């Protein structure tokens, strides 16, 4: 797998989502994940392009996955090629979204009538079914057991990983002047049965606020037409690369 041009190793497309596409490679254990510039919000009702988002997100997610791996967290990440492609382990995804929240924003603020920015005295973990046609419904462990999406041990392992990732990422981001407001994770099972973090960790899937100004440095700039979307993604990458705010 030393090819430098992703097109050379890009096999059949196995998935195409809003922001990413997944391709087979000649190695059945490895997939190629493409980060696209396309952006959607509100269940696909708002569509657009964020210039160079694929580049920024591929690099941001690579740095954060590598950081988590170095801290002992199993992830799917194997490497980056050609700026917008990740080589990732081929996993059986659970079809779940695990959301962790430190500060009220987005759907939590709407659903519970909390003011955006309210610091939660205890962080919250939520589970959603990944199903566009159903609008990604909120579910719990009973639904997961009834749908046989994973075993109770695998769910426990995902929740433990999500909390550990909260601790690790919040600390890392604090060093670069960002507050980790909330984020969404997706996990899968590798061929050995290990539960690993998959998908991406980017401003598309996390809310990052500048710790001094409180400015939003994530996809909310696109969702809420705040402008400066590309600059925010670039700034997150720049801070991660230089290791400080
Ligand atoms: N999120 C995501 N994909 C989704 C839904 C949510 O990446 O399909 C992320 C979102 O970027 C935020 C967190 O999960 O960081 C919590 O999102 P929320 O439920 O508040 O949803 P939203 O504000 O998008 O309605």
Image (spheres, helix red, strand yellow):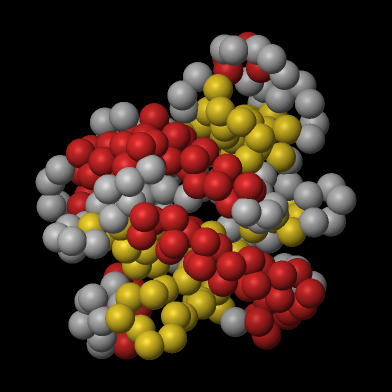
- The residue positioned 75% from the left and 69% from the top of the image is 154
- Give the total of numbered labels: 0
User: Could you say which is closer to the camera, residue 178 or residue 128?
Assistant: 178
- 239 sits to left or right of 160: left
Residue 203 at least partly seen: yes
From the viewer's perspective, is residue 149 above or below residue 64? below
Dividing the picture into quadrants, the one containing residue 211 is: bottom left
Q: Quadrant of the N terminus?
A: top right
- The residue positioned 20% from the left and 52% from the top of the image is 221
- 162 sits to left or right of 171: right
Residue 220 at least partly seen: no
Q: Residue 58, position in %: x, y?
A: 46, 35
Dividing the picture into quadrants, the one containing residue 150 is: bottom right
- 61 sits to left or right of 245: right
From the viewer's perspective, is residue 24 above or below residue 192? above
From the viewer's perspective, is residue 142 above or below residue 58? below
- The residue positioned 56% from the left and 71% from the top of the image is 163
Q: Residue 206, position in %: x, y?
A: 39, 58
User: Could you say which is closer to the camera, residue 169 or residue 108?
Assistant: 169
- The residue at the far right in this view is 192
Q: Residue 138, position in %: x, y?
A: 50, 76
Q: Residue 10, position in %: x, y?
A: 63, 20
From the viewer's perspective, is residue 212 above or below residue 148? above
- The residue positioned 71% from the left and 25% from the top of the image is 25
């Amino acid at each position: 797998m030393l090819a430098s041009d992703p097109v050379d190793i890009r096999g059949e497309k196995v998935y195409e989502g809003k922001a990413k596409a997944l391709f087979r490679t000649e190695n059945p254990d490895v997939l190629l994940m493409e980060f696209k510039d396309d952006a959607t919000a509100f269940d696909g009702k708002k569509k657009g392009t964020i210039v160079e988002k694929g580049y920024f997100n591929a690099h941001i997610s690579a740095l954060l996955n590598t950081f988590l791996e170095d801290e002992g967290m199993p992830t799917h990440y194997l490497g980056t090629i050609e700026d917008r492609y990740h080589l990732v382990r081929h996993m059986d995804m659970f079809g779940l979204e695990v959301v962790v929240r430190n500060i009220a924003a987005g759907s939590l603020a709407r659903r519970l009538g909390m003011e955006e920015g309210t610091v939660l005295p205890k962080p919250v973990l939520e589970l959603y079914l990944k199903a566009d046609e159903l609008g990604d419904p909120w579910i719990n462990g009973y639904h997961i057991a009834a749908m046989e999406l994973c075993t109770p041990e695998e769910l426990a392992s995902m929740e433990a990983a999500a909390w550990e990732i909260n601790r690790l990422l919040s600390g890392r981001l604090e060093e670069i002047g960002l507050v980790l407001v909330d984020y969404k994770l997706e996990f899968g099972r590798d061929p050995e049965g290990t539960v690993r973090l998959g998908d991406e960790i980017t401003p598309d899937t996390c809310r990052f606020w500048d710790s001094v100004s409180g400015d939003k440095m994530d996809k909310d700039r696109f969702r809420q037409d705040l402008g400066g979307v590309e600059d925010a993604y670039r700034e997150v990458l720049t801070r991660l690369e230089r290791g400080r705010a």
